[in-house]
Image (cartoon, grey):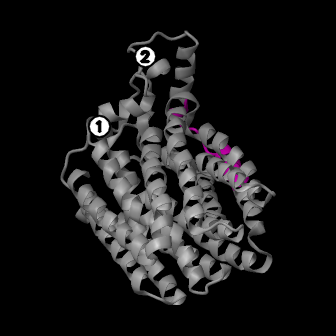
Amino acid sequence: MRWLRALYLSNGLAIGALYGFVPVLLQSRGFQPALIGLTTGLGSLAYTLALPAWGHLGDVVSGPRRTLQMACIPAAIFALGFNAPLPAVGIMVCQMVITGGGGPTLALTDAMTVPALGKNASRDYSRLRLLTSLGAAGSAIACGVLYARIGYVAAPFVYSLTMLATAACAMFVPLGRDSERHRTARRARAGRVARAKPERGRFGSVGEAFKVQPRLLGILVSVTLIFLGFMAGNTYIPLRISDLGGGPSVVGLSNGIASGAEVPGLILAGWLVSRIGLRTLLTVSALGFAACMGSWIVLADAGSIVVTRFAAGVFFGGIFFSFVLTMSRLLPVRLQSTGQTLFQACCFGLAAIAANVAGGVLYAVAGPLGVFGVGGVCTIAGGLVGFAVLPARDEARPVWAAEPAETAETVEAGDVAAPVPISTGG
């Protein structure tokens, strides 16, 4: 558990060191808002395409721990390209590799953690996930001060170091009994174990997840709509603060406050979920976040916007918590890497593509009203869809989620005749 805590913390350090500074970093390289939106949108496209593949690797081939390590290395290397004398196209390629490689680390960390927590997930997950928020908050504030003194040139180096630390922490996280499933799968691929079921279809574990849980499509629609608003705010609020006269330290403080506010948000979500249920928690959080976005349209002072980002961070904690627990509840253990990466491919991928590309045009044409107004409407719509499709408070859990132990059903080339028990308890 100690190394798992370190892994969540290192994820947060990486987020705070670079992701919140990408728009202003690109601006310092001479990128205009529309080109910033295109660059971050292309990065989100790479993220969207890469995450299902990382999830399939985590569930079927190498396990989430080794897959996480493989994802960290290219992100750490290509981040240094931000400081290289590259043309705009080269910077875009670096952004695509960073988001396609470094992006899935948190989803794969969740995939390792949530099944192991079992029935205690609603209580214990928030205690682990808040370490990411604390790390992101501290890193963003400290890096904001650092970048104010020596410039954004330091950002890629700090991010590369944190990604290498993430890979190192993952090395020491115990694989647990789930590792036996992957060893059995490798024996099956080598022909040493008979298969009991035909292989999956052409879409691998992603196709199986949709077959196992048809409700998954509606959940992903809700995710995408909500995060259209969130990603629009996340990308363009640093530009808004910069336009109002805030420097790197103010941008870093803003990002740090938003990330730090996720901690009480996650704690509150863990306390509320057993009382009001996932769907109500999600809807209330989405409506609250939309209200914060509305305030960014009318506020004309960087300090006031920084204050409202605390409330936005609390509501984001409730949104993220709701979707992670929903995937844990509706999908079996063998599909957790796929479920968590699909969820994050929609929120930080599909939604980010639309929010960043369209947001750049809206910000240039209509200013804050265009970006934050449209984003707020999308967030409200996503919350209402989520209320319709997320599991109700008194809804029975699927068989695989209710049992203390699951039989590893045969999967693709890893299908085996003899069942292997997989723990879903703590």
Camera-nearest residue between 326 and 425: 326
Q: What stretch is highlighted in magenta?
A: 163-179
Q: What residue type is labelled 2?
A: Ala
Q: Distance between the residues labelled 1 and 2?
A: 25 Å
Q: How crowded is mark 2: few (under 14 residues within 10 Å), some or many (20 or more)?
A: some
Classify mark 1: helix, strand or loop: loop
In this rendering, the count of numbered labels is 2
Residue 170 is inside the magenta segment: yes
Give the number of the mark in front: 1 or 2: 1
Q: Which amino acid does label 1 sit on?
A: Gln
Q: Residue 74 carries which label?
A: none
What is the residue that sits farthest to the left in this orientation? 394
Q: Which mark is residue 418?
A: 2
Q: In which quarter of the image is residue 318?
A: bottom left
Q: Mark 1 points at which residue?
A: 213
Q: Which residue is drawn at 56% across and 86% down?
A: 244
